[in-house]
Amino acid sequence: MVVRIRLQRLGVANNPYYAIAVAYGKRARDGKFIERVGSYDPVPHRIISFFISFIILFYFILFYFLLHEFFFLLSFEFWKKKEEK
């Protein structure tokens, strides 16, 4: 008897989730298995990627306004020194 390691699809539409299973070679992909040895989730966690993109956007906006304020003050000091001369 041939034994194979297969991925059984357990997820729903547009959200796949697979179980790694050991089954006989003649059995169907999602059919009866000997033992389930693991799992595999091909879709990255959406909530984590949302928070990471939110944090990147937050720091981008923060540094933009900080640098904008810095250069504004720097240019103000530059014109002030020019007027004193």
Image (cartoon, grey):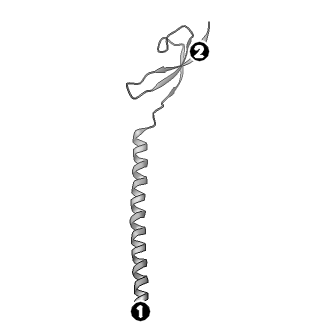
Residue 74 drawn at (x, y percent): 43, 78
Q: Quadrant of residue 12?
A: top left
Name the residue that disc number 1 marks: 84
Vertically, is 3 above or below 65?
above
Q: CA distance from mark 1 to mark 2?
A: 84 Å
Q: Nearer the viewer, residue 26 or 71?
A: 71
Query: Where is residue 53 shown, x and y percent of the image?
Result: 42, 49
Q: Residues within 10 Å of mark 1 (few under 14, many from 20)?
A: few
Q: In the rendering, which numbered label is found on residue 4?
A: 2
Q: Residue at x 55, y 7 (%)?
A: 26
Q: Quadrant of the C terminus?
A: bottom left
Residue at the outermost right position: 1
The number of discs equals 2
Task: Identify residue type, mark 1.
Answer: Glu
Residue 12: mark: none
Q: Quadrant of the N terminus?
A: top right
x and y, in percent, of residue 7 in the image: 52, 21
x, y percent for residue 82: 43, 88
Asked if residue 14 lies left or right of residue 36, the reply is left
Where on the picture, by quarter, is residue 5? Answer: top right
**Helix, strand or loop status at disc 2:** strand
Q: At x 43% / y 43%, what residue is drawn?
A: 49
Q: Earlier in the sequence, mark 1 or mark 2?
A: 2
